[in-house]
Image: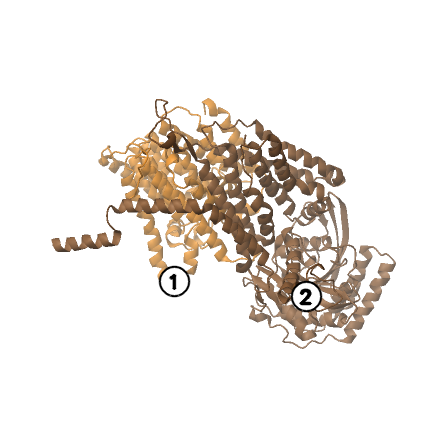
Amino acid sequence: MDGAADYAFPALVAARLALAFAPLPDALKYDHQLSSPLTSYSRLREGIYLFEHGIDPYSGGFFRHSPILLSLFSTVLPLTPYTSPLLWTAVDSVAAWALVRIWRLRTGAKHTSRDKQIAALYLLNSYILLPSLAFSTSSIENMLCLLAIMLACRGRASASLFALASLVQLSLPSILLAAPLLLLNISRPVSRLALPRPFEAPLKRTIPLFLELCGYVALLTFASTLVCGNWLWVEKTWGASLTLPDLTPNPGLWWYFFTEMFDHFRSFFLMVFSVHLIIYIIPICIKFQHDLLYATFLLVGVLAVFKPYPTLSDPGLFLSMFAVFPEIYPYLRHPIVTALIHLHASLLLPLFNSLWLRQGTGNANFFYASTLVFGMGNGAALMDAIWAGLRAAIGKLKEGYEVAQE
Amino acid sequence: MDKVRNGLRTLKEKLRGQGNPTVAKIRRQRALRERVWKGLPYIRLLLFIVGYLWLLVIPSSQLGQGTYIDENALQPGQVNTYWSWGDVHRADRVLADLEQLRERTAGSDEIARYAVAEFEKYGIPARTQQYSFDTVAGNISGTNAYAVLQSPRASGTEAIVISASWLSRTGEGDGTLNMRGVSTVIALASYLKKSSLWAKDLVFVISDGYLDGMQAWITTYHGETQPNLKAEPLSLQSGVIWTALNVDYPGHSFSHLGLFFEGLNGRLPNQDLMNAVSLISRWTVGVPVVVYDHIDPRDDQNQPALLPAWMPDVVKGNKDVQEYAARARNIRRHLNYQARGAASGVHGLFHQFRIDAFTMFAVPADGPHGFHAIGKVLESSLRTCNNLLERLHASFFFYLFVAPGTFMKIGSYLPSAILVGTAMLFTGLGVWVNAGWTHSPVIDGKGEKVASHRDGKAWQRRHRPVLQAVVIMAATHFLGGLLFLLVSSSWYAANPQVNGPILYLLFTAAPFIVQAVPPAPPTHASIASVLKAFNLCFASALISITSVLNFSLAATLAVFLGLPLSSAAPSRTSSSTTRLAIYHAYSALALGWLVLCPEETRNAVWNWDVLRVWFAPFVCIVYVPLVLQAGLVGLLSV
């Protein structure tokens, strides 16, 4: 870190570290909003315990983390009450650093006055901070996602694709980001929202990159299988994102639908929900072909709303990434409404969760209603980002003119 | 082919209207926006009026519905009761022993040991538990006695608690003894031991003090730790407690059974439990049931009149007015407990562990009921609780008990507070939009006025200082946190009469620091207007969300915040003295309790200290800063 941010960033990290070591209630680690069955710390610990005692953790139905994490934490990085806070703080710091790098690469400046604001917006965003304090592995996913984007912005194609391949190992739906990241690798991350133009670089160049990505994914898959000794992990980790076997409540939109669903509709709707995620890729990449970093940002937003097992850190990543695109702020249509929906949702989610599961006076519908409000808030933010991204191309209007959508 | 195309076109035109559809759409949107903007003041006013009127109408006799039993398994009053005069005699003997103990001014240890000896005499395992709380106001210690009657029919995974505290809830624990309640529980234990039909463990608890004893017992039972509590571990354990009945019988006889049900932090028990016991009391035993200890003056001439004497007789004689007054009294009492998060009796401590509990209060009178009636009610109620196959779970947790046998569903009272909150939200949004625009002379690139507009002025966007407003808000909430630390410290508890006014002055003066914040440049919106917008939006979100958790608190906030926050105006014309006066009015609204109600403050801090009621921190960290922010809005508008 250099320039003006040289003391702000360490100070933020230190504050973050102090929080991580603060005596926080243990209940945080079991909170449904902060960690999903796929990212929960206690499940990870249990899986590691089983693994170290020679029991295949994937033979049960409890452990759904990637074998990569399993091998990492059972060998080089043991999880203890002292290492975990350090590790998760480091993960968040790297992610914040990556976000600042993305901003610098976008503006082309070495360092700017907004650097510390951006780092603070990531490190102090409560949607990101709380899951990280709960040691949810979604923090690691966020870090990998930002690293993949940052490296793609720098044009380090191999490193970026490897980060993406690792991210896909941890969370299958992130494969959505492959298309914009491949294109971002062969274009530049500077803001062209105001000056849209057709994609210039030859698309042919993505083919070797795509093959490289496939190679990394295959390599990591092979490594995972080597770690486990069998293919069971595929069904337990990737399969969970597609078949939703664990209906533990989370702040996303999937779980309640599938608790209510009749079994004979289940497979059909699983297909619909999964395929629905894919339909956004091509339109967004075409519409924002002039600014693929923005397209990536929008797809992160799509994932935050419609992912099968989201935690609060997924919307958190989307909201923090807003910091990189200040040029759209004047064109946002309803920022205060979105902010208010988020304010209500962030108060309602924990309240209704505790009314249902702790106080016992409410029921599942309460929490479901609050996740709907939360989904609405994220959807509103996403819609507004799409609108503002397109609207920025038209610029300031003369009086008496108005922009309409056909 | 052309024909078809033409036909389609005409059809399209008919559907969309003539001309460019996009233009029509833009016109439509503009007209709608204009209409909403013009109507906003009226919408706000309407929402405020309807919201506040709704709050006033809640006690009306036209609202509310009769209580009913939702859980079929309860089957109240379907059994014969066998509690007899022999058992009453046993209760009388226990009472005589207790009176002797009182006369000897026996310590709580001795009383607890006596209770344990009694339980063990009947063959029920019993133990004592010593505890002590270390509070800012001093040390509280005592001894509980408890006994566990193992269920003869099941494995003891579920339990029912029958409890009585040594001090009655009369005067919120003013020192009146609950000796008859204790005798009832002990005699009941010996009686219940005889029957073999219990499917749940019966746990009898004689808790010391008023609330402190039961808090020590129930937290220890659930394995929770509290930093300022030292309590012996419980050597007798039982299963999950589903329901608890608390007996409070302070007088020598009683006329009515009163229901007290508010728990800590505004939690209420499932209504089914109280409805079942009310049915049993009324129809099996013949004891009328009232809400709280409120005996209706229409039933009893000796009760003080509810309506003021100056009212004309025509009004006083009106049935609806009388009903309104009776219900208003119940609701006021309810608001008083629930808004402060205070428990209206020992039962309130159970709710935090998902146990449905309430207090049966034997309203003191010269007659006609005594041990015989209360024993029968308890026996039959326990049989009803024994029937439960799962916890009481129907969404019967949100209600207002307006009169005996009448309650209001959540949908009939909740909108009142929400409407006020919505009105505040709209006010805030209006202020926010207004702050973003200015009607000023149009300056073109060369620094000259553009004459194309009427009087050279036009609506232009301007920058809104969001960051400054957010920092001011965060700072006031931080200040509130500081206030809470001071109020809950032993320094304040040592001398509230002096320290209250000191804190008042300190925290009235502290927000003046904001005047050091550089004012926004004239081309930007003022910090005050953005602060007001955020303040209103945040307060409205709080009211709407608290209403689900604790309606009374939300309604109180709606009254205390609704109009004051909305009418905080950044007025440019008024002199600095007027502005100071307005600020002081706000600070009095925010902090007046420090000077005016030291007793109330002490209670709230005690409740936080011992029972973890979050009313005191809520007031300091949420309410005070919100009102101070509204005060700052007036102060900042220079």
Q: Toward which corner of the image does residue A111 lie, by quadrant?
A: top left
Residues marked 1 and 2, same chain:
no
Q: Nearer the viewer, residue A254 or B158?
A: A254
Badge number at residue A263: 1
| Residue displayed at 52% across by 28% down | B519
Please name the residue that numbered disc 2 is placed on: B290
Q: Nearer the viewer, residue A335 or A245?
A: A335
Chain letter of the residue beneath label 2 in the structure image: B
Vertically, is B259 above or below A293?
below
Chain identifier, colour orange: A
Of marks 1 and 2, the one in the foreground: 2
Chain identifier, colour brown: B
In this view of the protein, can residue A243 be seen by the observer?
yes
Badge number at residue B427: none
Q: Is residue A392 left or right of B613 when viewed as pictured? A: left
Please state which amino acid type lies under the numbered disc 2. Val
Chain letter of the residue beneath label 1 in the structure image: A
